[in-house]
Image (cartoon, rainbow, N blue to C red):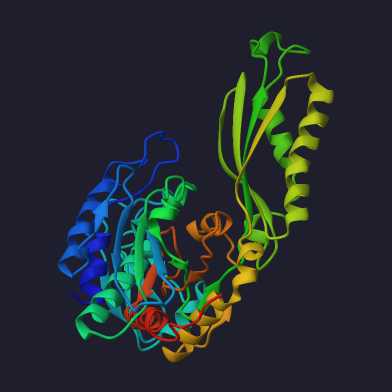
Amino acid sequence: MNIIERFLKYVSFDTQSDPESSSVPSTEKQLLLGKYLVEDMKSIGIEDARIDEFGYVYGSVPGKAGAPVIGLIAHMDTSPDCSGTGIKPRIVEYHGGDVVLNEEKHVVLREAEFAALQNSKGKHLIVTDGTTLLGADDKAGIAEILTAVEQLIQSGAEHAPIRLAFTVDEEIGCGTDHFDIPGFGADYAYTADGGTVGTLEYENFNAASAKVLVNGISIHPGSAKNKMRNSQQIAMEFHAMLPEHERPESTEGYEGFSMLTDMQGCVERTELDYIIRDHNLQKFQEKKARFYAITDFLNAKYGAGTVEVRLRDSYYNMKEKIRPHMYVVERAMDAMRKAGMDPVAVPIRGGTDGARLSYEGLPCPNLCTGGENYHGRYEYIPVEDMEQCVEMIKYILTDGTVISG
């Protein structure tokens, strides 16, 4: 199977994860892709391919004795932020300008809004019909990994021992909750979960989630004076006290943010859900402390127990754990150059399975897959960039196999 066939088959599976679910995986439909991947892996010669009780797919390929065992990881689920049901991909030969995704619904991929399109002139873009996400995050990573491994097996080329893992629920921060690191058996690994071709990531946000609960008092509005306490009004006051310039739409690069992701409420009770992000650990702690300070202020103003905040750390910046193992980064950048890329290390404005795995003792930077505009209807990926990423992965597995830490 070539990279296009494999990718289009994978995106035909609806694998959105569900942050409100308590099951593992969070959605049963992820298991359908997992079971298909096992069969696909076996068909290309990965004899021990298997799916475990949590939905994780594992497999291995023997390699050169004495070489480091290299892991390759990608996730099966897609973001719950945009529909993944009934994806209708198509391939567009791109020569510049705008791409009409859906004429009826007036959905247009505009070059003026998405500057990365300028780098894709002369390429073939896989796009959506403008009603769903595409799923390149991270089915492109899975397709590139298995296509590279298939080509290596068929060629008979000498390569490092390979360990493969495809995880569930990465998009809701649970991708490594049940990852079997000892059983995986890699000396180090790479997640193939990045974006623009040529980018390599080994720095990511420190991340936390916050739930703000506001308790009000409901009284008939006709007799509410000095009695009603409208939780919605207090919730808006809470939000207004967070710095306006520290929102995702106002930040870039290493700049952190606090983002309101969901809100629901009535006079009696309102809930606000936030994510908190910063590359700098001190600034990350300061952002979290601000939530407590605002809570204390509003409780002093309206009465104890009016506002409650629940904070939970999600993951931390992997840079601290990668820094002693920079040979892993150097190996990947060398492979990128051999594949014709101009490698550049960029900070992830998000997180990957690799962040948590690095903290748990498995160095795991993040490789590009070529996709753009993840998590939405404007998502696309150039076929030529996917093919280049396949070459990059093969170079990682075949070049410099005597590198060690």
* Figure check: 360 above or below 136: above
Work out which quarter of the rendered image holds the C terminus and state it.
bottom right
Picture quadrant where residue 104 is located = bottom left
Q: Where does the image place residue 369, in percent across and percent down from the top left?
A: 41, 73
Q: Is 94 in front, or is 3? A: 3
Name the residue located 60 percent from the left edge and 75 percent from the top edge. Answer: 326
Q: Where does the image place residue 50, in percent across and percent down from the top left?
A: 25, 54
Note whether residue 385 is visible.
Answer: no
Work out which quarter of the rendered image holds the N terminus and state it.
bottom left
Q: Is residue 306 left or right of residue 367?
A: right
Q: Where does the image place residue 340, in percent across and percent down from the top left?
A: 43, 91
Name the residue located 41 percent from the left edge and 61 percent from the top edge. Answer: 185
* Figure check: 70 above or below 302: below
Q: Is residue 10 left or right of residue 274?
A: left
Name the residue located 37 percent from the left edge and 84 percent from the top edge. Answer: 398
Q: Where does the image place residue 206, in percent across and percent down from the top left?
A: 65, 54
Q: Is residue 119 left or right of residue 330?
A: left
Note whether residue 398 is visible.
Answer: yes
Give the number of marks. Answer: 0
